[in-house]
Amino acid sequence: MDLARTEVAPAKARKGSAARLGLMALPVAFFAVFFAYPVAAIVARGLKADGAWQFGRIGDVLAQSDIRHVLWFTTWQALVSTVLTLLIALPGAYVFARFDFRGKQVLRAVVTVPFVLPTVVVGTAFLALVGRGGLLDQLWGVRLDTTVWAILLAHVFFNYAVVVRTVGGLWSQLDPRQEEAARMLGASRFAAWRKVTLPALSPAVAAAALMVFLFTFTSFGVVQILGGPTFSTLEVEIYRQTSEIFDLATAAVLTMIQFVAVGAILVVHARTVRRRETALRLVAPETTARRPRGAGPWALLAGVLASIVVLLVLPLGVLVQRSLDAPGGYGFAYYRALASADGGIFLVAPIEAIGNSLEYALAATAIAVAIGGLAAAALTRRNTGRLVRGFDALLMLPLGVSAVTVGFGFLIALDKPPLDLRASWILVPLAQALVGVPFVVRTMLPVLRAVDGRLREAAAVLGASPWRVWREVDLPMVRRALLIAAGFAFAVSLGEFGATVFIARPDNPTLPVAVARLLGRAGDLNYGQAMALSTILMVVCAVALLLLERVRTDRTGEF
């Protein structure tokens, strides 16, 4: 009997490994052709001359004072943005974790809206608030669009939900009686929080901080719109060197630097997540949030609500207001102007960008869900092998490489048969799907791993095929997670700008590309149309998010 079991186990393991490799095949091929190949092509174009690598160009680029300034600004603005986001958002995380109040679910959705908004819309919203003719300019004559403060505040706006959801999700699972016991022993409220709660929260705080740092370190749309010629991050400088100066050597070096830096960040983030998972297994069961009691909790709730209104709601409200503030009075003049192509900026009417974006986003979502679903299924079984860990890291790489590099790499690499796709509409969805796949994997993987493997084995013993096992066992349990993954992929694809700005054809612009082009032209009409398009894009993203909130369950996690 034991001999039979020992013979069955290796056979079962080999069968499982073969199935895993089969699931990994298509995602690996997709990333090899549409990610590794274009990035390698643009790096080779910049660092290779006469068939030989010119690595000396790396030192030449780093010796330039303006490049060192870009590196320094990219790093310190990301650090400051991260610290500001934590300071402002941690009280909000506490309120959502511990307090129960009317309208909490709606407010949670409102807080999350900025996170799914395209960076172009975020930049445009703050331009309407702090830029020329903005609310601050009208009331007090103050303009911040030429200062670093506009960038920092926009980054807080964009990443507030990251801290609230990541830290708040763990905070709601901590037993408050531990902190209460410390206070009964004589500790002050702050001392009890610092010695009891903060150590338990530290993995989640570190994970949120690393995520915010990653997003702000690779910031493009916000800095492009609010920074002007004064401020430039690595991502913006890669775009400038590629599209304006056409210095591919410098762009290639900067791409490599960003890739190494973000790779190190992702390694630290992975270790932090593992620490967080260990901590979650040790905490007390989830507690029920209670209504605020006493002046202090009510004051805290009021302060958090005020900060949400000022930092999150006000910029979006001003964006809507500016889109309606036409020369002849408030109305929809700028929206009606979107139906005309007389401005000469586009070959088609700007309003057609709405349909283009929706079509591209739907196609990109289908690709991302297919590739990400296969990848998540391959990673379902817990395995610490190098092959699996390398595959998992591969899926996250698009978040660590400049989207500008990917977009320009598409034009350089995918220009010869059988991959001559420069004139094909599918080029844009392919680029957008690269960014959506990591969100699909991270959303579906925890739920797939939670499915009891014995259910799959029982179905297989009864004669079910692998496809039927997936359809009858896995799919009913992961359907909600699949919908949420598709929603995030749709929102991310809808707002993708860095790669799309290179490959979107002039007669088929997307919403973010159209907004950026309108902002780049002088005139009140162009500015008003940019505000109108940004408002439309904001509404579409908000609707997608509200639909996600309706299907969200605690089992699928916060992100």
Image: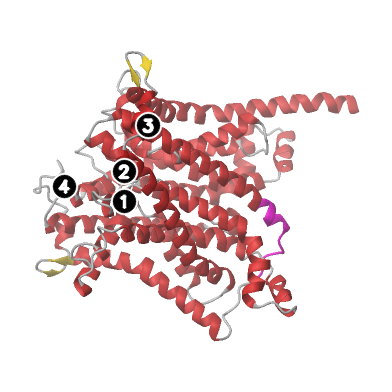
Q: Position of residue 141 (x, y in %)?
A: 20, 71
121 or 361, which is in the foreground?
121
Q: Residue at x 69, y 39 (%)?
A: 456
Q: Secondary structure at mark 1?
A: helix
Asked whether 216 falls inside the magenta stretch, the response is no
Contact, CB < 8 Å: mark 1 with mark 3?
no
In the displayed structure image, the side of residue 533 where residue 407 appears, left or right: right
491 or 147, which is in the foreground?
147
Contact, CB < 8 Å: mark 4 with mark 1?
no
Question: What is the CA distance from the residue labelled 4 to the residue labelled 3?
Answer: 38 Å
Q: Position of residue 329 (x, y in %)?
A: 12, 70
Contact, CB < 8 Å: mark 2 with mark 1?
yes
Query: Disc 3 marks which amino acid?
Result: Val
Question: What is the CA distance from the residue labelled 3 to the residue labelled 2?
Answer: 14 Å
Q: Secondary structure at mark 3?
A: helix
Q: Which residues are magenta?
A: 277-287
Looking at marks 4 and 3 on the same chain, the residue that comes earlier in the sequence is marked by 3
Q: Which residue is mark 1?
A: 223
In the picture shown, does residue 509 fall above or below 191?
A: above
In the displayed structure image, the side of residue 124 where residue 87 appears, left or right: right
Looking at marks 1 and 3 on the same chain, the residue that comes earlier in the sequence is marked by 1
Query: Disc 2 marks which amino acid?
Result: Val
Q: Residue at x 54, y 48 (%)?
A: 443
Q: Residues within 10 Å of mark 3 (few under 14, many from 20)?
A: many
In the displayed structure image, the side of residue 235 where residue 3 appears, left or right: right
Looking at marks 4 and 2 on the same chain, the residue that comes earlier in the sequence is marked by 2
Q: Secondary structure at mark 2?
A: helix
Q: Residues within 10 Å of mark 4 (few under 14, many from 20)?
A: some
Q: Which residue is mark 2?
A: 236
Q: Which residue is mark 4?
A: 349
Q: Which residue is mark 3?
A: 253
